[in-house]
Amino acid sequence: MNKVILIKYGELTTKKGNRNFFVNTLYNNIKNKLKNYNVKIFKDISRMYIEFEEEELDSIKKIIDHIFGIHMYHIATIVDTNIDSIKKELLEILKTKNFESFKIETKRSDKSFPYKSTELNPLLGTYILKNIGNIKVDVHNPDILITIEIRQYHSYIYTNGYKGCGGYPSGVQNKAMLMLSGGIDSPVAGYLAMKRGIKLDAVYFEAIPHTSLEARNKVIELTKKLAKYTDEINLHIVNFTKIQEEIYKKAKSSYCITIMRRMMYRIMEELAIKNHALAIVNGESVGQVASQTLTSMNVINSVTNMPILRPVACLDKLEIIDIARKIDTYEISILPYEDCCTIFVPKHPVINPKEDECIKMEEKINYEEMITEAVESVYTLKITDEVSKKFEKFL
Ligand code: ATP
Ligand code: MG
């Protein structure tokens, strides 16, 4: 096989001091994701190369499209580093393509090669023009950009490539806990956090029998979609029924959502500590609902000192939906099952809650014990992008 997948790193190459760590993490992630394929992976400081079996290429591409840390990738042809082999292979490659204009770009890392890049471009360009009819050179907007990377023994020739999903490799940051509801926003928030290299555990609050198993299933399906971008995600399911019922019995109806969210944050903090996570991630977006005004966020946030990442805080709903479609969570998110935030929604939730009011109402609820109980009774599923075997047992 004289072809390889040639991978170009994204942003990580700017992190000089950490470069090896980033490259090694990306290498291990790719290796792990492709463990069931017949591939060989090689890395250097600026590129990774994957030798593959032709019939597996389509499935491998689908996997690579979900690996963070990859900026671009190309299917490159390997040739011996001599001008005749390069010319011959160039024609072979271009014969299979349909184009009217082209540009050649050569990168010469082997300085012993007898031609400089500035000499090679016109030399090869002229050769192509002579051998293929009805085409022209266009240096500004070519149909095909042909890149030739000259190395000591082998050179790589490739044309237009595929955009990778960018970001940092999964796992270059510590873990965070994602509050994952069945809505549109939180899976997008999770995706954006993972894109920064953060490892995620997900937490879902349910209030059975007020919420259904279908609602839980929806969250499992969403977790599977997110797991495509990493190896596996622990999904912690919190039984929130008792706490929620107590809130609705004891608190003023306009404050129920505010207090409910303070309880969620308290549980999140405990779960984060228990699972060695350093931040909480959620899908709050400024101004979207009453509990997401800046006043509400302050009052809700004040129950924890843990950093809260809100990746979609400043995005419009339509921008969030665009990402949800791209990561294939949108169709699942719009399924109509009730979530514990949408049951018992008060007619007039408070927009500017007061913290001392919350504290007064919370004093009537024996919440500390209930929180401990909720944390201790958490059920954890290990979700991969395929199936959760444990989940079948759970149902
Ligand atoms: P939507 O897309 O409809 O806004 P949402 O999931 O964003 O759905 P919100 O009520 O806006 O719902 O909640 C804000 C954030 O709080 C969510 O993005 C999510 O991170 C977290 N959250 C809400 N409900 C739950 C839940 N049942 N379990 C876990 N996290 C939740
Ligand atoms: Mg929302």
Image (cartoon, rainbow, N blue to C red):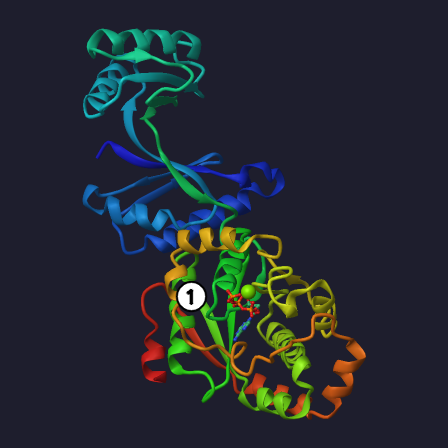
Q: In this view, does 157 lie above or below 136?
A: below
Q: Which residue lies furthest to the front in this view?
A: 347
Q: Name the residue: 42% across, 17% down.
A: 140
Q: As drawn, is 40 to the left or to the right of 304?
A: left
Q: Name the residue: 57% across, 91% down.
A: 242
In the image shown, does 343 or 185 lie closer to the viewer? 343
Which residue was labeled with disc 1? 333
Q: Which residue lies furthest to the right in this view?
A: 356
Q: As drawn, is 69 to the left or to the right of 255?
A: left
Any atom of ligand 1 within 8 Å of the CB at mark 1?
yes
Q: Quadrant of residue 78?
A: top left
Locate the N terminus by quadrant.
top left
Q: Residues within 10 Å of mark 1 (few under 14, many from 20)?
A: many
Expressed as whole percent of the image width and height from the top left, the position of residue 319 reads 51, 51
Q: Is residue 42 above or below residue 185?
A: above
Q: As drawn, is 118 to the left or to the right of 270?
A: left
Q: Name the residue: 22% across, 16% down.
A: 88
- Number of residue marks: 1
Amino acid tagged 1: Ser
Q: Name the residue: 61% across, 57% down.
A: 313
Expressed as whole percent of the image width and height from the top left, the position of residue 253 reads 65, 84
